[in-house]
Image (tube, coloured by chain):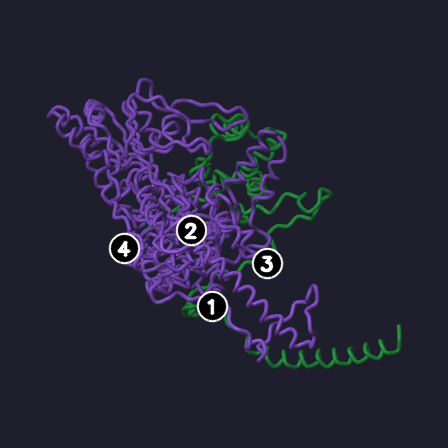
Amino acid sequence: MSGARKSKNPRLERREFLQKGALAGAAAIVGSSAELTGQTSPPASPAPTTPIMTAAGEAIGPGEVQVLRDNQRSGSDFMVDVLKTLGFEYVAANPGSSFRGLHESIINYGGNKSPELITCMHEESAVAMAHGYFKAEGKPMLVAAHGTVGLQHASMALYNAWCDRVPVYLVIGNYNDAAVRRPAEWYHGVQDAALMVRDFTKWDDTPWSLTHFAESAVRAYNVAVTPPMAPVVLVLDGILQEEGVDINKLPAIPKTPIPAAPQGDSASVEQAARMLVAAESPVLVVDRLARTPNGMKLLVELAELVGAGVIDQTSRMNFPTRHPLNQSLRAAAAIGDADLIVGLEVADFWASVNALRDQLHRSTRRIAKPGAKMITITTGDLYVRANYQDFRRLQDVDLAIAADGEATLPPLIDAVKRLATADRKRAIQERATKLADANRVAADRARVNASFAWNAGPVSTARLAAELWAQIKMEDWSLVSSYYTSDLGGWPRRLWNFDKPYQWLGHAGGGGIGYGAPASVGGALANKKHGRLSVAIQTDGDLMYAPGVLWTAAHHRIPLLSVMNNNRAYHMELMHVQRMCNARNRSVDRGAVGSQITDPNIDYAKLASSMGVYAEGPIENPADLGPALKRAIAVVKRGEPAVVDVVTQVR
Amino acid sequence: MSLRVLRISRQAFVVFLITLVSAVVISAQIRPTPQAPPRRTPPPPKTAPQPKRESPEPEEKKPPTDRGSEGSAPQQPGPAPQVSSDPAVNAGAALYRKNGCYECHVNDGQGGPQGPRLGPNPIPLPRFVAYVRNPAGDMPPFTAKVVSDDDLAKIYAFLQSRPAPPQVKDIPLLAP
């Protein structure tokens, strides 16, 4: 309970004010109305009139006009004090009256710095920006939203972040006390505001006092960033934000440190190390492993120690693309050859060692060889929810360690170093040489594949990737989003040299389209202070979910090059419908109905320039692409966003 | 209609005419100075190659059928129209697009993450047809009801006609 509530009965005081204030206001309006019309009494249902200041109206005594006294702060000022201790750089928000108190405190009391308000055109954009920002910066971004309509808009992006195990720190406004709601606040008022997203957030709370807020705000941060990480929600009561609090009676702000990530138990780690050292052809499959910049370094060390091939499933920037042990371009073959497969923070380990045939009658087959041993190390075993089925099929494994993958790598590396004998080290070296050869062959094959349709128009996606690489490879670049790079066959991962942790931010997580554009802007916002050149390969269908984020990038001077992968359809969905046509043996030519974005074609250059973003395109001739990219990069280097619309082949 | 109403209407009509004429005159004076689209930064130099803008009309629009506006097969953003002296190749290009082959095997048959490269130099026609009818992997089956053998032969001709790519060593952008 806050100090203010202990000293008086503020709720009673507030209601008293509201009653007096309301009566005084009504009297003033009635007085004005009477002056205007000459009537002596108002009609039973007076027609709406514009109040006019009159001498008679002003003669009426004032209501209890309330402003904060000198010895008071608003509740939301204190909330800003607490949020500042958590180190937020930015708060992304589309404005909403239920957090008007907090909004005003951020911009005035907080000086609009740490956090700085980022104006968003949609709550889904705000949350997805925070999603991308976290993966570039390694710390959460604050998001503020209306408690009902705002949260409903935000919910899809929250689901993506939850599936992707990314901590988004969301505060939502709500007037909990029905007795003080303005008329519009009834539509925006809700009994249990966080209920609708509780299935896919890690924790939520509704503080009833400032003491409660301070504890829950710090707890929410720690819960969110402790692996397994996930979004959290705090519901901020509107009155708690707006009420005055005696500055001498403000609650203390907790200083609880962030808990350490859970590490695998020593016996299990020792057993895993023994299996790795003894294996003849181990493979490390990684997905959301690298939580911090140190994650890639640790994985390289482990892979080199045991001579293991690495398959990067790309939800994070786990392993350098041109490292000789990288076997991602021949993943199925590497899995098929392996006698030990280790899954490190793999979301879908079953699908890593099995295949499902998507025909009318679905069937599965194991792609791992018979007798291959399997180990998993994942926080997925520490966190399973009932409703949403992100936990995937259960794969039989020989050893399962419920722990954070990155936190478990140091003791695993130490154990491997202890156990590796000279004989094993020789075998490991020979294996590494063979894997390096296989890596080289796969890379050469990728370059040959890229040469097909090289001069075709629309532009091939390989040509797009190669042209873009030529323009950025000498820069300190970061590919902040690209749907097709999420695919192991995506051209940037085949042609570019990714070797720094921030050069790839992973993908949406939940497969909800609309992530790419806002997450790119969020990633670029994080990259801005590091001076990195942020680049996105932006699909057309994704951008059209909430293109207003381009305005946010322009307004806040967020440097980002978005290269449109404009293939004018939702091609993945189109394929699914055509598959159904095939299965039903009818009219495959009609499979595109409902999935195309043509007639009319969208002019993305005009769309972007209408929001103040430098733009070029549409480009269909591949020879025009390089010069256009060069011009756009010059704009981005000046600190502004740019869009180059490229009409591309289907994939 | 009363005379009063008619009188008001006449007055309104005269006012409307004056307004219309004024608007035309004013707009004619304004038209020579069109507004440039808003840009935060200067446009590219005029000497830079400007991509050709697309026609607002779809490239291939079929007349509506008795199934309504969505009754006809939609425009397919598949491979670009073929310039070939062989009608079978051009027909094959259209069929490749119409039947959605490009979705996995990409616009020019070069292949991608969802399907292998088909051309140039496709596998022999009988094996090609046999695989399309009864694929072993994830590819959906295309029966003779949805694509005839004759149509498959035309698609095959299109795949055969795909140009060989430049040598990788001749493409500086693909240097390792």
Pointer 2 and pointer 4 on the same chain: yes
Report the front residue among B141 and B123. B141
Report in which chain the residue with disc 3 lies.
Answer: B
Secondary structure type for disc 2: strand
Amino acid carrying label 1: it is Val
Secondary structure type for disc 4: loop
Q: How dense is the environment of label 4, judged by Cα within 10 Å: few (below 14), some, or many (20 and up)?
A: some
Report the front residue among A548 and A606. A548
Residue A255 in the image: state x and y as whole percent.
25, 48
Report in which chain the residue with disc 1 lies.
Answer: A
Secondary structure type for disc 3: loop
If you read the primary sequence from the N terminus, does the residue marked by circle 1 or circle 2 appear first?
A: 1
The colour one sees for chain A in the rendered image is: purple
Q: Is residue B133 above or below residue B11?
A: above
What distance separates the C-alpha of mark 2 from that of mark 3?
50 Å
Question: Residue B155 bears which disc, if any?
Answer: none
Amino acid carrying label 2: it is Leu
Q: Is residue A457 visible?
A: no
Q: In the figure, the green chain has which letter?
A: B
